[in-house]
Amino acid sequence: MKEGLVKASSKTSLLGLALVAATAGAEGWPFPEFLGGVSNSAFQVEGSPVESDWTRWTKIPGKIKDASNAERASDFWNRYEEDFAWSEKLGAKAFRLSIAWERIEPREGVFDDKALAHYEQMLVALRRRGQEPVVTLHHFVLPAWLADKGGLEAPEFAALFSRYASKVTDRLALAPANVRLWMTFNEPMVLVHQGYLKGEWPPGRRDDARGAMRAAANMAKAHLLTVVAERVKHPDTLWSVAAHWRVFQPVGKWLDPWFARLSNWAFNTQFLDSLHSGKILFWMPGSEIVRDRVELGGRSSMDYAGLNYYGRLMVEFTPKPPFVVVEEGPGPKQDLKWEMYPDGLEQAAKDIYVRYRLPIFVTENGLADAQDQWRAQFTADHLAALQRAQSAGVPVVGYLHWSLTDNFEWAEGLKSRFGLIEIDYATGNRKPRASLEAVAKILREWKPSNDPKKP
């Protein structure tokens, strides 16, 4: 979670929206009802008995701010039925979870059928409760053996990912799990930013622009190869990534708007453009240009746009290095000091739709709020923003709240509380926060607009 988008002028954005609204709705989207629900990810909730780059990272003193780890987390691996019962009480129509690559392939080329069967059991249990599974194949974590081979930069990364993806989909895209909604990667540009530029996540590089762009290009190629192959084998599956899209706004005039546009391209659009066209192109200051291509036959590799939204960033030029300052906006902040800016979700949905003409599925939106003081209003305000986007012609097909339960928040550790359900990490006990019922009511009552503006 973190980073993303320049705010285009409303004139340009709405003009573009008008041009495509009539021809680019949610045609081909097979789900008749709005998919409201929740999200989580494997490493953050399951517990982590298999060695990965992140299990190693948590053992390095100082890497996790509260010195915690995810060895148990919320024990979702064993208590998923309990959590699915809570999501059912929420009224969830969809539940997003991820597959732990390190569980499926703990050693290179050695696949654990028991782990895959356990995920199948999870998904069948989810379907019994009437919830559509949304499955992410990679949510930040790499098997230890792959990290040792170079991780995201390994020359064979795309092929190795595609092989792993094939093993998973060949089991879970078929009965009894019947997973139709797939996402290859979660927030790839966040992973690049945190792991190669800030050094706060594995592999712990700082200011490694070349490594960052190689990693991004490898993830893009892995996505493209996977989608091309899996569409042939499993034509009923729908594919995307969960892209963290930040609204970048200039502080003032002069050079600020130019740097905001550059930030938008670097963080938001260069990855999605590669997936949309099959023409892989990555560059940032300090790196070489990375190019590649995968033939898509004139079709986007994305069947819908997975949108993770957490806020905006303000961009300001400075005459001294690094020449640009990017900071959280001035509005109210949640526990992690990220600005709460619901209007940005409307803008993000519009801008993504104008650029890619895909149904918009909000696959993460939430906040760290240990006292549960903002969560209900936060959710209502963001769904209202989505409704405004839909009234302007954007096909909004779903919204998943992050997260159902408290979880391990990467370098922040266990202290940050994102859950509708509070976790007592000493006992594993679950306790619903007051916002659970409030959010359930919001999801029940929120209706997609039936009167979109005509072009």
Image (tube, rainbow, N blue to C red):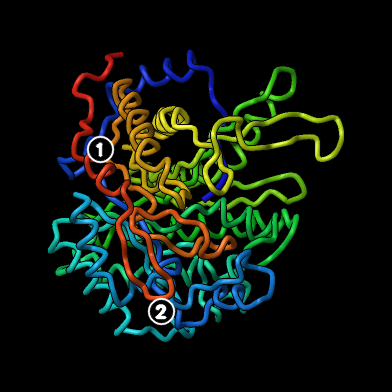
Observer-nearest of 355 and 72:
72
Kindly state the secondary structure of the residue where label 1 is placed. helix
Mark 1 nearby-residue class (10 Å; few <14, some 14–19, many ≥20): some
Placement of the C terminus among the 4 image quadrants:
top left
Q: What is the x, y in percent for residue 393?
A: 30, 23
Q: Which label sits on residue 172?
A: none
Q: Residue at x 51, y 60 (%)?
A: 409
Kindly state the secondary structure of the residue where label 2 is placed. helix
The quarter of the picture where residue 313 lies is top right
**Is 176 left, or right, of 324 in this rendering?**
left
Instruction: Tell me which amino acid carries mark 1.
Output: Ile
Q: What is the x, y in percent for residue 406?
A: 41, 60
Observer-nearest of 298 and 32:
32
Q: What is the x, y in percent for residue 90?
A: 22, 51
**Residue at the spot of label 2:** 103
**Residue at the spot of label 1:** 442
Mark 2 nearby-residue class (10 Å; few <14, some 14–19, many ≥20): many
Q: What is the x, y in percent for residue 141?
A: 51, 68
**Closer to the observer: label 2 or label 1?**
1
Query: Total of numbered circles in the picture?
Result: 2
Instruction: Tell me which amino acid carries mark 2.
Output: Arg
